[in-house]
Amino acid sequence: MSLAPLLVAAPLVAALLCAAVARRAAAISALAATITLVVGAVVAFSSFGAPAEHALAGLMYVDALSGLIVLIVALVAAIAALYAVPYVRNAVGAHEIAPTEVRWFYVWIQLSIAAMFAVPLMNNLGLMWVAIETTTLTTALLVAFFRRGHSLEAAWKYLMLGAVGLGFALFGILLTYYAASHALGEAAAALDWAELRANAAALDPALMRVAFALVLIGFGTKAGLAPMHTWLPDAHGEAPTPVSVLLSGALLNCALYGVLRFHLLAAGTLGPSFSSDLLLGLGAISIAVAVPFVLVQHDLKRLLAYSSVEHMGIVALAVGIGGPLGLFAAAFHMFNHSLAKTTLFVAAGALGQRYGTLRLARMRGAFEVAPLPALGLVVGTIAITGAPPFAPFASEFGIAQAGFAGRPAALAAAVVLIAGSVLVFGGMLFHVLNVALRTAPRHLHVASFPFAAAFVCVPLVALLVMGIWLPPQLREAFSAVAAVLRVAP
C-alpha cells in the first residue's frame, strides 16, 4: 500500500523532467510508464482479496474497486506512452508536430496519467473531483495538439461539455457534503469516502437522491454515457492516437469510477432501486444511441469512439442489473474493453499514419499495406463486438444472463444489450472488412510496423486466453470488485 503515492508522483516527476530535458522526453515518458505499470500491478493485486487500506494519513484509499481502476490505468498508460514514441516520431516526419513541441506532448501525457491515477486513489470525494477535472484540462490540451481547425473545435467542445458536466458533479458533491456534515457531526470527515460509506444510512435521503442524479449527469458526461456523450467522437476523431488510447481505455473508466462510488452511497441511503434504475436507463440509452452512428460511420476513430459509448453503457447497465454475476461481469467487461479498445486504437493509428487519413472510404487493402495493424484491427473488432471465444463475449454473456435472471427492468435491459450487440457487430465488421480486404491504392507500398507487434498482439492474445480460461488471480480480482459493488437489497 505504501507504493500507491508513487503512482501519482512518478508521472509528475516525469512531466517535469520532460519539460527540462527535451531531448530525452520520449525515453523519460516511456521509463515512467514502465515504472507505473509495475507499481500499479503490485498495488492493484495487493488490494484484491484484502481489506481496504489507507495511505498518506488517510488521504489515499485503496480497495478492490480502486485497485481495478489502477490496474486498467497502469496497463493503458504504459501502452499509450510506449506507442507514443514511434507515433510522435512519424508525426514529426509528416510535419504534423513541430520538433520543438515534442516535449510538451510528453509533458501533458504524463500529467494526464498522474491525474488518472489520482482519481481512484483519493479517499476524499472532493479531491477525486479535482483529479477528474485535472484530467479534463490536460487531455483537452492533447486533443488540440495538432492545432488544426477541427482539433481546436473538438478540444473546445470537450472542454466546455466536460466543464458543464463536472459543474453538475460538483453540485452533487456539495449536497453530499451538506448531508454528511449534519449526519457525521464533523465537517472534516464529510467527504471522506470510508466514513461516508460506513454512515450512508444516516444521510438525508432527499439530498442524496438529488446528489446522485447530479453526479450521474456530471461524471456520466466524462464517462461518455448518452445523451451526454457528444464530445467523445469529436475528441477521438481529432486527438493524436496515443491520446485516444488514454481517453477510451483509461479516462472513461476513471469517470465511471466516480459514478460507481456515488451509486454505493446512494444505495446505502436510499436502497438499491433508485440508483440502479438510473444506471439501467442510461446504460440502455447509451447502447441504443451508439448503434445507428456505428452503422453509418465514415471515420475509423469515430467508429471506435461510438463503440466506447456502447461499452460504457454496457458496464453501467451491468451495475444496474446487480447481483453477484452482473457485478462480476461488469468488472470483467471494464477490463476487457480497455484491452480491446487500446489494441484497436493502436491499429487505427498505425493505419491512419500509413494512409494519411482515417476516412473509411479512402482506407483500402489494409492487409496488403500494413498486415499486422490490419490483423489487429480485424481481430480486435471481432473481440470488442462480443464474438466468441474472446473475453468480451464471456463478460457480455454474463451480463445478459444476470439480466434474464433479474427483475423485469433488468430483463428488458438484457434484451437491449443483445440487440445492440448484434447490430454493432454487423456494422463494425462491415466497415473494418472493407478497410482490410478491398484492393489497395497503387501508390501505397507494403509498410512495416515492428512496434505494433507487442501493442497489437499481446492484448489480443490476453483477450483470447481470458475468453477460454480466466486465471485464478483475475477471477479473484473481479470477485473482489463485485463484493465492493454489492449493495444490500
Image (cartoon, rainbow, N blue to C red):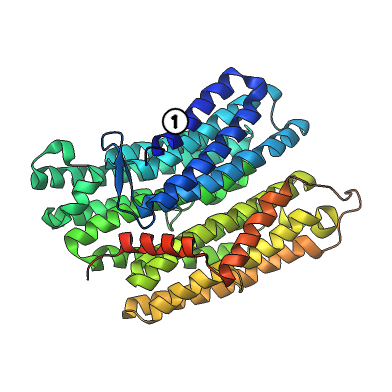
Q: Nearer the viewer, residue 435 or 455?
A: 455
The image shows residue 193, relative to residue 377, as above or below, that is above
In the rendered image, which quarter is residue 85 located in? top right
The image shows residue 371, relative to residue 38, as above or below, that is below
The residue at the far top in this view is: 20
Image x and y of residue 32, in percent: 56, 33
In the rendered image, which quarter is residue 94 located in? top right
Image x and y of residue 392, in percent: 55, 67
Q: Residue at x 44, y 30 (%)?
A: 9
Q: Residue at x 45, y 76 (%)?
A: 400
The image shows residue 424, relative to residue 20, as above or below, that is below
The residue to which callout 1 is attached is 9
- Horizontal side of 219 relative to 452 (left or right) equals left
| Local secondary structure at mark 1 | helix
Residue 251 in view here: no
Q: Nearer the viewer, residue 114 or 385?
A: 114
